[in-house]
């Protein structure tokens, strides 16, 4: 669990003091257990085990949002703490920072509406804006790869990406499929990271999902083949523009 700031002044806030004891405990627990972007995957079984068997998430959700929106339910079922990023990192995210870029990619891949962040956060572009040749781009990809903390095996690479694709599309692609592994193996050998591929999936899903002509192309054979580089360049451009 990463270290993070704790709001000690919350004990002076009426909205917090008016919560039931169980709901106060749950708020603190979510703040401690959400990811680095303030996104939490509800686990009612674990929450009840730790806090109280009678805990009600809907009651909690309504209570913490009684006077302003502190928690937003995302389409994928996760919850987003609207004030988490400004409190932890300030009012600016610089995509030139590996940490801030990771945070922004979590927002993108979870389809978080950036206007829901309160207070508002400014997203600044990365050094990629200044790149002018392929060699420099290659060096930057290698730098990104070196910054990746987790050594991802090819099996884990495939599994995480395909599960994410299934979550985005509502389909049931098999990460053990020979063809799917073949498409992803080429990207893996290029040095692409899980974050690179998930960024493509997130962006193309946002672009194509629900489109009568394009929705069917949200599949491994389209997304992960040679045009992947074009999709990634487009996704990165949109990321750097804060879109």
Image (cartoon, rainbow, N blue to C red):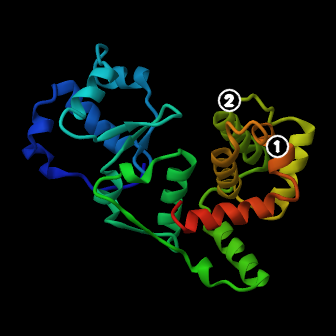
Residue 131 percent across, percent down from the top left: 66, 83
Q: Is residue 45 above or below residue 90?
A: above
Residue at image coords 37%, 38%: 72
Q: Residue furthest front?
A: 212
| Between discs 2 and 1, the one toward the N terminus | 2
In the picture, the disc for residue 179 is none
Residue at image coords 62%, 56%: 150
Q: Quadrant of residue 79?
A: top left
Q: Is residue 173 above or below residue 235?
A: above
Residue at image coords 62%, 62%: 148
Residue at image coords 66%, 40%: 164
Residue 173 percent across, percent down from the top left: 79, 32
Q: Residue furthest top?
A: 54
- Residue 236 appears in the picture as rendered: yes
- Callout 1 secondary element: helix
- Callout 2 secondary element: loop
Q: Is residue 32 above or below residue 60?
A: below
Task: Tell me how far mark 2 sits from mark 1, CA to CA.
Answer: 14 Å
Residue 205 percent across, percent down from the top left: 67, 44
Mark 1 is surrounded, within 10 Å at the Cα level, by few (under 14), some (14 to 19) or many (20 or more) other residues, namely many
Please state if 177 lies on the left or on the right of 111 as rendered.
right
Residue carrying label 2: 170
Mark 2 is surrounded, within 10 Å at the Cα level, by few (under 14), some (14 to 19) or many (20 or more) other residues, namely few
Residue carrying label 1: 220
Residue 125 percent across, percent down from the top left: 51, 74
Frontmost residue, 202 versus 151: 202
Please state if 2 lies on the left or on the right of 50 as rendered.
right
Frontmost residue, 160 versus 123: 123
């Amino acid at each position: 669990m990463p270290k993070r700031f704790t709001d000690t002044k919350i004990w002076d806030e009426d909205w917090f003091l008016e919560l039931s004891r169980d709901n106060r405990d749950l708020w603190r627990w979510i703040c401690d257990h959400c990811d680095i972007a303030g996104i939490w995957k509800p686990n009612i079984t674990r929450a009840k085990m730790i806090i109280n068997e009678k805990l009600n998430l809907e009651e909690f959700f309504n209570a913490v949002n009684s006077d302003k929106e502190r928690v937003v339910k995302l389409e994928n079922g996760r919850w987003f703490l609207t004030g988490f990023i400004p409190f932890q990192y300030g009012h600016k995210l610089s995509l030139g920072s590996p940490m801030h870029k990771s945070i922004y990619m979590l927002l993108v891949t979870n389809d978080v509406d950036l206007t829901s962040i309160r207070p508002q956060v400014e997203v600044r572009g990365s050094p990629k804006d200044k790149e002018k040749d392929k060699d420099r781009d290659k060096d930057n990809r290698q730098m990104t790869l070196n910054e990746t903390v987790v050594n991802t095996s090819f099996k884990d690479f495939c599994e995480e990406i395909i599960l994410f694709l299934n979550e985005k599309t509502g389909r049931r692609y098999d990460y053990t499929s020979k063809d799917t592994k073949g498409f992803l193996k080429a990207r893996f050998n290029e040095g692409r990271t899980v974050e690179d591929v998930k960024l493509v999936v997130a962006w193309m899903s946002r672009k194509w999902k629900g489109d009568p002509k394009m929705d069917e192309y949200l599949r491994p054979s389209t997304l992960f083949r040679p045009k992947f580089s074009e999709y990634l360049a487009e996704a990165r451009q949109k990321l750097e523009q804060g879109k």
